[in-house]
Image (spheres, grey):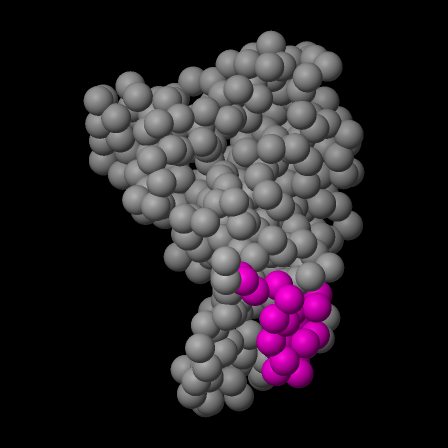
Amino acid sequence: MREIALNILDIVENSVKAGASLITVTVVCKDNLLGVEIGDNGCGMDEEFAARVLDPFTTTRTTRKVGMGLPLFKMAAEMAGGGLSLVTKKGVGTTVKATFVADHIDRAPLGDLGETMSTLLDDERDFVLTVETEKGKYVFDTRDLKRELDGISVTEPEITVFVRDMIRENINAIGGNLL
Amino acid sequence: MKSIADIKAIRDKMQAQIVLRDNQDAEQETRIVVGMATCGISAGARPVFNTLVDEVAQRNLKNVKVTRSGCLGMCALEPIVEVFVPGQEKVTYVHIDPDKARNIIASHIVNGNICTEYMITKG
């Protein structure tokens, strides 16, 4: 994964598969620490599965016996002097949090969160994206978007392109493109 | 800077088109599906997805949907794009990049010519 935003996309896909109706993505960069948190209200994991979910040879998919999503995210964080923690409860949801030392030489760039969010847009579930830097804070909530859309699908290509460009502009305005 | 309130203009323009489209048979929709599991994402599926969406929006193509799917089990061939045109057999493209994605829209979706050079070859 070349960007943290790609890891985020990958981890959020797990929340989508867990049947979550609300997924939050929070990126905070302050005091040389970059924190990325992905939380959902999906099906969660039981203790036994949670204990081995960071093992690449654990997966829910049926086409292969390896699952690299969480292990790759953990590796990216640990390479950059940080770490990954996971809180989950069966039937309640899962929260994955990774931290990175922001100026660590091996930290991947944050990347394009606009593209990550536009890829995820869905009529079935909602997302709240929060990006906070020392220059400011940007919050994007798909529930606000859907209210404005008044029944038009968020997956209409024209809407997807608009949302992507809007998120990019707003994140750039608070220096998120430099992370 | 753009905000959610700016979506109103696009919404009003689209609402008229949507009514027209809903009257057509829903089965007439062309679907373009991009594999978006760990394997696809790390191979570059996200820019491919976004290029396809860009092209569909720019060309103002009606009844074309770009969606994501999970792992198809052919991780070495990612990014994989599947095209479902109503009444035709599914076409699977492999090792797709943004340039190839643009060609798929131009040749296959717009002009109906399958890009055979991007398909899986036998043996």
Q: Position of residue B8 (x, y in %)?
A: 64, 67
Query: Is B21 situated left or right of A59 in this image?
Result: right
Q: Which of the pair B21/A131 is nearer the observer? A: B21
> Image quadrant of residue A175?
top right
Q: Is residue B81 above or below residue A45?
A: below
Q: Quadrant of the N terminus of chain A?
A: top right
Q: Which of the pair A68/B51 is nearer the observer? A: A68
**Magenta stretch: dominant SS?**
helix
> Image quadrant of residue B121?
bottom right
Q: Position of residue A78 (x, y in %)?
A: 55, 14
Q: Please name the residue shown 63% across and 71% down the image.
A: B115
> In the image, is residue B110 part of the stretch drawn in magenta?
yes
Q: Is residue A153 above or below residue B123?
A: below
Q: Please name the residue shown 23% across and 35% down the image.
A: A91
Query: Is A15 situated left or right of A108 in this image?
Result: left
Write down the region rendered in magenta. B102-121
Query: Is A51 situated left or right of B87 in this image?
Result: left
Q: How many marks?
A: 0
Q: Which of the pair B109/B50 is nearer the observer? A: B109
> In the image, is residue B82 part of the stretch drawn in magenta?
no
